[in-house]
Image (cartoon, rainbow, N blue to C red):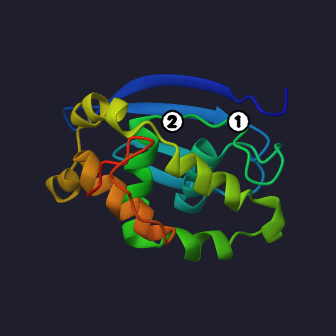
Amino acid sequence: DPRKANQLHGNILHKGQRLKVSFVEDRYFDDYPMEVHSFGALTVQTEGVPGLYHRKLRCVGGSGDGQGDTVVGGRQKARDVFDLYVLAHHTPIQKFITELPFPFPVFPVDAFHNGLVSMPWFELMDELQEIDCDPQWTPGKDVGHLQNFLYAQIGAKPTGGGNDGIGE
């Protein structure tokens, strides 16, 4: 199934800290070159930040196999929107999308927008609080702040009603 990914998850100990490590191979595997990074004595090949950013956008917007703005195969997890929050502080979402290394119509931008807007924000609150992060990213654990920030990235504004619009 081209919408599924082969995944392997585990933990390593680095400088006394437990780090979750995930290995993912899917149909986007060859879109971004591998990078080599060292963690003490351990050297690993990994996908760079652009590849991770692309995957997080796809998590929210799905595979793009639907019709236009339809989300197909997306997931709605706190970790994914929190990661987008951090990534968008480095490169705004719309800027990243326009700089994708493949033709723009291939990325389902309307499906991403719909996936973000239809996120079950209230349901993410507990999961967001469980995220361990550097103190500078703590505001992103507040669902209202997170929603407002990400909506602003796509030119949307929470309404305060309807589908868990809690940003105002």
Left/right placement of residue 138 relative to residue 131 reads left
State the image coordinates of residue 40 (x, y, percent, origin top left).
Answer: 33, 46
Q: Nearer the viewer, residue 29 or 154?
A: 154
Mark 1 or mark 2, earlier in chain = 1
Residue 22 appears anywhere in the view: yes
For label 1, count other residues whose C-alpha is less than 10 Å away and answer few (under 14), some (14-19) or many (20+): few
Residue underneath mark 1 = 25
Q: Residue at x 43, y 44 (%)?
A: 162
User: Which label lies toward us, 1 or 2?
Assistant: 2
Residues at discs 1 and 2 in contact (Cβ within 8 Å): no
State the image coordinates of residue 42 (x, y, percent, origin top left).
Answer: 42, 40
Residue underneath mark 2 = 76
Q: Which amino acid, by three-letter code, is at mark 1?
A: Glu
Left/right placement of residue 61 relative to residue 103 reads left
State the image coordinates of residue 74 (x, y, percent, origin top left).
Answer: 63, 37
Q: Quadrant of residue 1?
A: top right
Left/right placement of residue 145 relative to residue 99 reads left
In the rendered structure, find residue 105 and report the number of the disc placed on it.
none
Mark 2 residue element: loop
Residue 19 appears anywhere in the view: no
Q: Residue furthest front?
A: 161
Structural distance between the alpha carbons of marks 1 and 2: 20 Å
Mark 1 residue element: strand
Q: Quadrant of the C terminus?
A: bottom left
Q: Quadrant of residue 100?
A: bottom right
Q: Nearer the viewer, residue 130 or 144?
A: 144
State the image coordinates of residue 126 (x, y, percent, origin top left).
Answer: 25, 28
Q: Which amino acid, by three-letter code, is at mark 2?
A: Gln
